[in-house]
Amino acid sequence: MFHVPQRDSDTPGKSMERLFFLGFVAALAVSGAGGRYYGDKVLRLQPEIEEHLQFIKNVSRSAKVDFWKPHSVELVTTNRSVDFRVDADRVSDLQAGLEKIGLKYEVLIDNLQTLIENQFDRKASRSLDYSYESYHNWDQIESWTATIADENPNLISRFEIGRSYEERPIYLLRVGNRTGSLKPAIFLDCGIHAREWISPAFCQWFVKEAIRNFGTRSTLDTLVNELDFLVVPVVNVDGYSYSWTKDRLWRKTRSRNPGSACVGTDLNRNFNAQWCAGGASRDPCSEIYCGPQVESEKEVKAIAGCIRSHSSTIKAYLTIHSYSQKCLFPYSYTHALAFDHEELNNLASNAVDALTSLYGTPFEFGPGASSMYVASGGSDDWVYDLGIKYSFTFELRDTGKYGFLLPESQIRPTCEETMLAVYHIASYVLNHLY
Ligand SMILES: [Zn+2]
């Protein structure tokens, strides 16, 4: 289905040396990112009445808070907790205000900068091998995509499916052994939101596991025999790079917005699924800005274009986010149930059971609108309406203790448990081809 592999000419050994060096430099860059979050806290509020909502709205007008869950003040409702970051110099005022109006809260993260530095809690490996239990910056991941394809030509091919706003290539790895015939495919993307670092780590883990299992007659080996997995390790390459070099908590793309000083569009509000209706904002400064028009973002064009041109072979779509430990399926743009609701609900339930069986990690599941919040322009809804029935969004660990700053020591268990859910869905899809 794809014909023009794009590879660079580095030998694997040379690439690995370069990766190791880049990793060292990158870790220095992030850990020393100016200490800009020193003393900042993340609070979890429990708004119960209208007065509480009004208070949160007033606070949000200050540029010094940043909503983590939900992602924007527009999505805040009563009886659902709200996680947000507040600047160090505003903390005591805010806490006094909360206590005055009786808005219950807890401090989730006491010093954000400490947590940012503690993400890299894995002891440095002496091995020059690529570590799948470390976070990698974009340069490292880009080199990895080339190396992994070069070293595994029978299993993996790399394609450039588009370029980002800042002209970085967006790569797709086709993972599946060559049978000579057209195989049904599962599309798996990671890194739509920049700060959700566990997501690209999962896509890399998936590819690593496919290689490790190749020829072993294991479940995954069977799956890559029968299916192609189309894996995009990082969709929002500009935002991801920015989250390493400038702002660890960046979410959106890096496209400029004419007439506004605010940068970026929320990729997961930019797809053609009831674009910019509920749960999206027309304000370029919002974290859920839907963009100037549908598919305005080059990253969305790349993903949507690729899926459209292979929509008859793609049978399932999995998109990986964090955090909140949820498995969601359409719809998010409406409370109406999807035509396939019952089947998707059963499949999600069983996938989550498989995930939880490994470490007991609790996972919720359900349609996006009721399990999370109403949100339009999301990739999963767009894919579903295109006719790809098995469409799921995973929100990986955790539920707020570390939030987006999940330590590296949790990469392995998070990926291991998520693999079980992916196996379950992929096996089901294989037995229910349409
Ligand atoms: Zn996300």
Image (tube, helix red, strand yellow):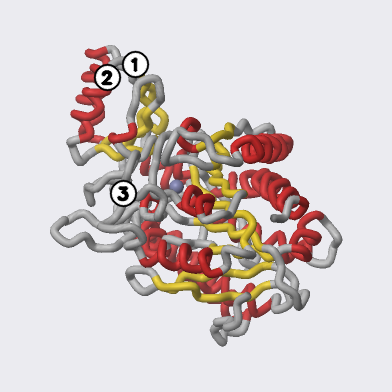
Q: Residue at horizontal 22%, vertical 34%?
A: 60
Q: Residue 341 at x, y = what percent?
A: 59, 37
Q: Position of residue 128 (x, y in %)?
A: 63, 69
| Residue neighbourhood size for the residue with mark 3, other residues' Cα within 10 Å, grouped as few (<14), some (14–19), many (≥20) | some
Which residue corresponds to the image point at 50% horizontal and 51% vertical from the top-left? Answer: 385
Q: Looking at numbered disc 2 in the image, what kind of residue is underneath it?
A: His
Question: Residue sitting at 42 percent across and 34 percent down?
Answer: 373
> Is the Cβ of the residue at disc 2 closer than 8 Å to that at disc 1?
yes
- In front here: 82 or 376? 376
Quadrant the C terminus occupies? bottom right
Give residue 100's position: percent from left, percent from top: 22, 13
Q: Gap between marks 2 and 3, in whole Å?
A: 32 Å
Relative side of 421 to 170, left or right: right
Determine which of the numbered discs, if any, sits on residue 48 in the image.
Answer: 1
SS of the residue under disc 3:
loop
Is tag 2's residue or tag 3's residue first in the polypeptide sequence? 3
Q: Determine the secondary structure under disc 2.
A: helix
Q: Residue furthest right?
A: 217
Q: Which residue is mark 2?
A: 52
Residue position marked by numbered label 3 in the rendering: 35
